[in-house]
Structure formats: structure tokens, C-alpha cells
């Protein structure tokens, strides 16, 4: 082991932004027809004929509200907004709207509701379940123009900003004030805080700072009919009635458009260490997690795991990264980060923990980053797995919550199911019981899909897991919600949707099964 100190972690990437552009290059430009329905949508989804078709009067009206610059019809620009980050889901919208204020969002939605024009709210378009792009000709409302920081309370660490702020920009801002964002993810260079909230993004700091349900203090949301719902409190405690903001955290643009956010930011701590370790078997990873929780306690800030297939993929497809443990291949790799307030104490604690773990046979080999560049390399491997995956061609992506002791079983079962027709990767936020199961092949194939689904959902439900730990349901899993939620819960969700968006203009075909939303189903 290389026992060396690391300064504080400042990894900024823009990596996802670059990858977004690459994915966009591969998009063929024959938009106007929905081309693909990969993943879980076995049958092409029919356009709901109740929705109006956009006409020139609509476009003129939008221009009167947003000005010419806020109404994009240019085919190339609209084509980019029609395709998701993976290049997998593709819509056929003819119109991209770029509002600059809550009032503009309100007028756009009030009009769309009155005309029954369907709408897709869009942030950084880094979502991984087809939620952020149209299915047919829905109008795209992208929040990127609403990117102002409104205020920062540097006593309590409370940030208030517009929903279109890019996460990485917010991180830089609050770090300059001595705080950090409570969430961090590989897409930080492109994803927006409004998108993070709408997906209830988890990410790499969840183990330490928990869910956005805990960190978001207030929201401003525009409802489908244009009503502005001001819930933009900055209070830590407020038990007056139902806490409505939680309805929008994780609702994937189906209940309203988030326009402003207030969020609690933890203090930035001076000492960060990152270790990259290898384990010979999955049982050792589990024991290491338990030991890390016990021994590192309050300074543990990340516990991520990857199997060997992930490392091989990263080394093949990511430029400028190198394997920190190149001597021999291991079955599993773990990235541990600690963040604390006392440099010598934190370092000694991590070193002692790693020594013990090696003596106990839990860790086969390991290294602690000596500087920021090494730490960045460790993180780049972990954060770059999704970027490397899309370079292979086709990626079937599953994001599962499973009890930790069973979490890797499904990776092995999947490997034996697909044989040599596809490569199976297992990685994720082990500390949160969240497995990312990626199945890669050079192109999409019904045969491979038939090996994966419904098996993956049945297996997960059978182990009382969740079929979406953090990415959401989107288009991919709207019809699969019953694997993780009871019929009664789905019915209540559908009733809430009907109450809040009676014309169903917001993000149609996503999140909830079409059958639950049909008029025959009681509201
Ligand atoms: P989009 O992709 O634009 O939209 C996502 C959903 O939110 C859509 O349904 C959209 O309609 C809705 N939406 C967006 N903005 C708004 C708004 N203002 N109001 C209402 N609805 C809105 N996710 C994780 O949870 N953890 C990770 O670690 C993680 N890592 C990732 C790494 C990479 C490289 C990539 C590409 C993605 C990753 N993701 C991760 C998935 C994705 O980045 C997150 O879900 C992110 O929060 C989406 O933000 P976005 O602004 O890109 O939203
Ligand atoms: C991650 O943890 O890397 C993300 O959720 C993205 C992914 O799985 O592709
Ligand atoms: Zn993740």
C-alpha cells in the first residue's frame, strides 16, 4: 500500500458534456419519425390522438412570450434536444422552447394546457431512462436559460437558485463560499439542479449526505395549468400541513416544472483522502463496507465498487486514465473516500483501517492517492464507466436497489444468461445498496433483450428490491412500476397526476403506466 496524503478533492470534469456531444454526433438526422423503442418498450408507443398538433399560430404565440431567441425551430438544434445522452431514445419534436423566467414558464404551460399541447420538461438531458426527450412531437421546454444564483446564506449554507443552474457551476460557487453541494455525479458538467431534483438523483455523496428529499428545503414549481406554486422556503423545519415539495422531488417532470430551488449545502471540510483497493471476492467487498462504516464512521464520504469488467472497459475507452493497481487483475475494486476536518487524524484513521483490512484478508491490494491528479484518476475510472459503456454501442442499463448481500448475484446470473452475446458489468454505490447492471453489446438486439427482461425485474422484485434506485422510471420503466409498487400505490399516484395535470400534458407516456391514467380508471 502506498500511504500518502491527498489534498482536497476538486474534480471537475465537463466529461459528461463532451460525451453528450459525442453521443449527439451519432444521431441520424431523419427526425420526424420515432425510430427506436429499445429497452423495455417492446411495442412502439402510439401517439395519444387527444393531443393537438403544433401549428404556426402556436409558434407565433410562443414568440410573443419568449422572443425569437427563446423559440428554436432550427432542425439541427431541435434534433439534438430530441435525443437522449445515450443516443438511445429519440423523439420527433419540432419545437424547443427556452424560457428565461418563471413567468415565461407559466405562460408557456398555461397556453399548452389550454391548447392541449404535450410538453417535455428538459434540463441537461443526461437522464438515463428516456425521460428527458419527447416520445412523439411533444414541445421541449428546456430550463438552461434559467441559470441564476438568487442568494447564498453563508451562515446556514443555504443556496437558492434557478432550476437551470448546472450542478458543476453550483459546486464551484458554493466551494468558493466554503461549502459543498450535497450531491455529486458523473454528469455534473451538464446536468441541472432542476433535473437532479426531478429525478431525485443519488450519486456519489449519498452515503454521507443522504437523499435530496432531506437536502432540498424549498421549491418553486409551475403546474401544468400555469399556476406558480411558491414553496421556496429556506427553513430547516416546517411542519405546516402536507410537505408538497416532496411530490416534485423524483416526479420526473410529470407533475410540474421546477423553476427555483433552495438547498442545504454542507460545510466544505479541509481533509480528503481517496483510496483505490482491490478485493478477491464479493464477500470481501461486503465485509469491507461494514468495516468501513464501523472504523471510518463520520469521515466516510464514498464507498463505490466496480468489477474487473468495468476496469477493463474504462482502460479501453477512457482517454488518459490508468489502472492504479496494474500488477495483477482482481475480481473487484473499491473506491473509498474520506472527508474530515483533521488532516493528521483522518489520514491515520484511513491508514490504520486499510492495514487492518489487509491483515484480515479483505483487501488484496490498494493505493491511497498522493495528490489531486491521482485522486482525479481514481474518480475518473469510477465516474467514467457510463461514458465508456456508451462507446461500446448498445447499453442495456439497469439501476437496482438490492440488499447488499445479494447484490452481485444478479450480475453473475445475468452473465450466464447472456453468455458471450454481451458483456455484463456490475458497479455502483455499494454503500447505498445500489447496483448498476450494464449489459453491453455492439448493437441492440431483441434476442439479448429477451434474455434480460423480464428476468431482471422479476429477480429484483423477488428479492424485495427496487427496479429504480436512482435513475427513475422515465419511458423505459413506466410500464414496469408494478414490480416495485403495489396496485394501490400506483392508483394513488395516477389520481395525483390526474388532479395536478388533468389534461396530461406534462411528460406523457412516462413514469406511470398508460392503463393507470386512462379515463376509465377512477380518479
Ligand atoms: P434531464 O435528463 O434533462 O431530465 C431528467 C428528468 O427530469 C426528465 O424526466 C425531465 O423531464 C425532468 N426534468 C428535468 N428538468 C426539470 C425541471 N426543471 N422541472 C421538472 N422536470 C424536469 N443519476 C443519479 O441519480 N446518480 C448518478 O450517480 C448519476 N450519474 C450519472 C452519470 C452520467 C455520466 C450520466 C450521463 C448520468 C448520470 N445520472 C446519475 C443520471 C442523470 O444525470 C441524473 O438523473 C440527473 O439528475 C439528470 O439531470 P438533467 O438536468 O440532465 O435532467
Ligand atoms: C453512476 O453511478 O455512474 C450513474 O448512476 C450512471 C450510470 O450508471 O451510468
Ligand atoms: Zn449511480
Image (spheres, helix red, strand yellow):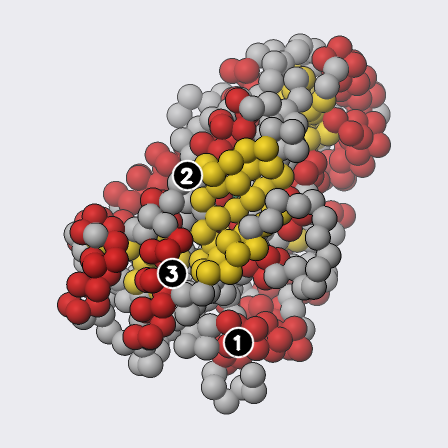
| Crowding at mark 2 (Cα within 10 Å: few <14, some 14-19, many 20+) | some
- Position of residue 218 in the picture relative to residue 365 (left or right): left
Q: To which quarter of the image does residue 1 belong? A: top right
Residues at discs 3 and 1 in contact (Cβ within 8 Å):
no
Q: Secondary structure at mark 3?
A: helix
Query: Mark 1: is the Cβ under 8 angstroms from ligand 1?
Result: no
User: Which is closer to the viewer, label 3 or label 1?
Assistant: 3
In this view, the mark in front (2 or 1): 2
Residue 347, given in percent of the width and then of the height, sits at 74, 14
Q: From the viewer's side, name the closer residue of 177 and 255.
A: 177
Residue at image location 79% in from the left, 18% down from the top: 349
Q: Residues within 10 Å of mark 3 (few under 14, many from 20)?
A: many
Residue for badge 1: 499
Taking the image as shown, residue 179 lies to the left or right of residue 68, namely right
Q: Determine the residue positioned at 35% across, 78% down.
A: 48
Which residue matches tag 2? Answer: 148
As drawn, 3 above or below 321: above
Instruction: Please give the residue where the numbered disc 3 appears in the rendered image.
Output: 106
Give the total of numbered labels: 3
Question: Disc 3 and disc 1: Cα gap in Å?
Answer: 18 Å
Q: Position of residue 122 (x, y in %)?
A: 39, 53
Q: Is residue 18 above or below residue 93?
A: above
Inspect this view and state whether residue 81 appears. Answer: no
Amino acid at each position: 500500500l502506498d500511504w500518502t496524503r491527498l489534498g482536497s478533492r476538486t474534480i471537475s470534469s465537463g466529461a459528461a458534456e463532451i460525451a453528450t456531444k459525442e453521443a449527439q454526433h451519432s444521431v441520424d438526422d431523419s427526425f420526424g419519425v420515432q425510430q427506436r423503442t429499445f429497452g423495455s418498450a417492446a411495442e412502439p408507443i402510439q401517439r395519444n390522438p387527444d393531443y393537438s398538433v403544433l401549428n404556426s399560430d402556436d409558434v407565433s404565440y410562443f414568440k410573443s412570450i419568449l422572443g425569437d431567441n427563446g423559440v428554436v425551430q432550427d432542425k439541427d438544434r431541435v434534433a439534438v434536444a430530441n435525443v437522449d445522452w445515450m443516443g438511445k431514445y429519440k423523439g420527433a419534436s419540432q419545437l424547443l422552447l427556452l424560457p428565461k423566467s418563471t413567468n415565461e414558464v407559466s405562460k408557456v404551460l398555461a397556453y399548452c394546457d389550454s391548447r392541449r399541447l404535450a410538453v417535455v420538461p428538459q434540463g441537461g438531458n443526461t437522464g438515463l431512462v428516456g425521460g428527458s426527450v419527447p416520445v412523439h412531437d411533444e414541445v421541449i421546454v428546456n430550463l438552461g436559460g434559467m441559470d441564476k444564483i438568487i442568494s447564498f446564506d453563508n451562515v446556514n449554507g443555504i443556496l437558492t437558485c434557478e432550476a437551470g443552474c448546472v450542478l458543476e457551476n453550483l459546486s464551484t460557487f458554493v466551494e468558493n463560499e466554503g461549502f459543498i453541494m450535497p450531491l455529486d455525479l458523473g454528469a455534473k458538467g451538464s446536468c441541472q439542479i432542476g433535473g437532479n431534483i426531478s429525478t431525485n438523483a443519488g450519486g456519489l455523496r449519498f452515503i454521507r449526505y443522504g437523499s435530496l428529499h432531506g437536502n432540498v428545503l424549498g421549491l418553486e414549481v409551475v403546474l401544468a395549468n400555469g399556476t406558480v406554486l411558491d414553496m421556496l422556503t429556506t427553513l430547516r423545519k416546517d411542519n405546516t400541513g402536507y410537505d408538497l415539495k416532496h411530490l416534485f422531488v423524483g416526479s420526473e417532470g410529470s407533475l410540474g416544472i421546477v423553476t427555483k430551488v433552495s438547498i442545504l449545502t454542507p460545510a466544505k471540510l479541509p481533509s480528503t483522502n481517496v483510496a483505490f483497493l482491490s478485493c478477491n471476492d464479493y464477500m470481501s467487498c461486503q465485509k469491507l463496507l461494514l468495516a468501513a462504516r464501523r472504523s471510518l464512521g463520520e469521515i466516510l464520504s464514498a464507498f463505490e465498487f466496480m468489477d474487473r469488467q468495468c476496469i477493463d472497459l474504462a482502460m479501453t475507452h477512457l482517454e488518459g486514465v490508468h489502472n492504479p493497481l496494474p500488477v495483477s487483475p482482481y475480481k473487484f475494486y473499491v473506491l473509498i473516500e474520506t472527508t474530515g476536518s483533521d488532516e493528521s487524524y483522518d489520514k491515520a484513521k484511513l491508514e490504520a483501517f486499510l492495514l487492518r483490512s489487509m491483515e484480515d484478508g479483505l483487501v488484496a491490494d490498494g493505493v491511497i492517492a498522493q495528490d489531486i491528479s491521482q485522486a482525479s484518476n481514481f474518480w475518473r475510472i469510477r465516474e467514467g464507466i457510463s461514458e465508456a459503456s456508451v462507446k461500446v454501442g448498445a447499453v442495456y442499463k439497469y439501476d437496482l436497489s438490492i440488499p447488499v448481500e445479494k447484490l452481485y448475484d444478479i450480475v453473475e446470473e445475468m452473465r450466464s444468461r447472456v453468455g458471450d452475446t454481451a458483456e455484463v458489468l456490475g458497479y455502483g454505490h455499494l454503500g447505498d445498496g445500489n447496483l448498476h447492471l450494464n449489459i453491453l453489446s455492439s448493437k441492440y438486439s431483441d434476442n439479448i433483450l429477451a434474455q434480460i427482461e423480464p428476468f431482471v425485474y422479476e429477480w429484483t422484485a423477488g428479492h424485495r428490491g427496487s427496479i429504480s434506485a436512482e435513475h427513475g422510471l422515465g419511458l423505459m420503466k413506466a410500464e414496469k412500476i408494478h414490480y416495485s409498487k403495489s396496485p394501490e400505490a400506483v392508483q394513488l399516484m395516477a389520481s395525483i397526476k390526474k388532479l395536478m395535470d388533468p389534461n396530461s400534458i406534462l411528460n406523457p407516456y412516462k413514469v406511470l403506466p398508460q392503463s393507470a391514467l386512462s379515463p376509465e380508471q377512477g380518479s
